[in-house]
Amino acid sequence: MNVYNIIHEVFSCIKGGINMTLAKFGILRTVVEAGSLTKAAETLNLTQSGVSHAIASLESEMGFPLLKRDRAGISLTDNGERILKYIREILHWDELLKQEAAAIKGIEVGTVRIGTFTSVSTLWLPGIIKQFQHLHPSIEIKLLEGNYTDIDQWILNGSVDFGFVSLPTSSPFDIIPLKKDRMLCILPKDHALCGQPKVRWQEIIDEPFIMPKVGCDNDVRRILKEQGITPNIKFEVADDHAIIAMVQNGIGISILPEMILFNKPGNICTPELEGDNYRSIGIATVSLIKSSPAAIRFIKCVKTWICKAQG
């Protein structure tokens, strides 16, 4: 669907063809992503009343509510869900237009919105962003951090230009592979298997196991399934640091990617597992061809930085 069809679809929902501004679209998008008017106001450097007024004005122009407000926070109405996908598309094309116009004049501008997860945010992005800002100081970078499921959804709905993902993804994205990250066994330091350089699967099949929750780290489940192993799951935990803490205290053992264990505490050990076990980290986007010039520049910077980091 091209931009003219998108704009027509949006305006067909509005009584009287009332003029709407891109600024209001941007405010609505930020409110949805932040989950609250207060957080959105902080992000946009606006007052909360200013954000509320913009949303109320947009709802008035549309002729129906876009947001639901309850104790859990802010969420979209069904009609809001229908409208937001077009708003995101319009904002995307507006960003491309600004970047293209600036490029014609020999100027670099734009915003790159990136989905990322904790280990990439910790180990890669500080160095990548530093390098990128040195090369492209006028391009703004915005990060959305979540789990694998969050990032897939953000890419699909246009919340981010691209995201760091574990491959393969559940959606048909354009993919750029970056790194194979070893999966290691985590044991308390006094465990009988700690002296071994490599742990066999049959040696841990009956051990109490701390499983990462679905969506947070699907690689562990994938590897166990590939090995035909049904672990003795005692707890399912979302946070990697919580998993490590439970192993430290002898509650069970687990498996995590090496990147998460880069700064491991001294009272655990992390032997390899038999076989070739790893997660593949890459960049995913709906379409590389349709990506903005700023996003393409950032992806290029990522590839260069990773190549140098891996020697």
Image: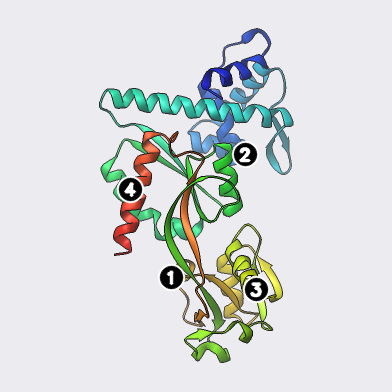
Compute the Cα span from label 4 to label 3: 36 Å
User: Which sits earlier in the primary sequence, circle 4 or circle 3?
Assistant: 3
Marks 3,1: beta carbons within 8 A: no
Q: Residues within 10 Å of mark 3 (few under 14, many from 20)?
A: many
Q: Disc 2 or disc 4, which is closer to the eye? A: 4
Q: Indicate whether 287 appears above or below 215.
A: above
**Residue at 48% over, 33% down:** 45
Marks 2,4: beta carbons within 8 A: no
The residue that label 2 is drawn on is 36
Could you say whether the residue bearing mark 4 is in a helix, strand or loop?
helix
User: Which sits earlier in the primary sequence, circle 3 or circle 1?
Assistant: 3
Could you say whether the residue bearing mark 2 is in a helix, strand or loop?
loop
Residue 215 lies, in percent from the top left, at: 63, 57
**Residue nearest the observer in this picture, 79 or 174:** 174
Q: Which mark is residue 262?
A: 1
Q: Disc 1 or disc 2, which is closer to the eye? A: 1
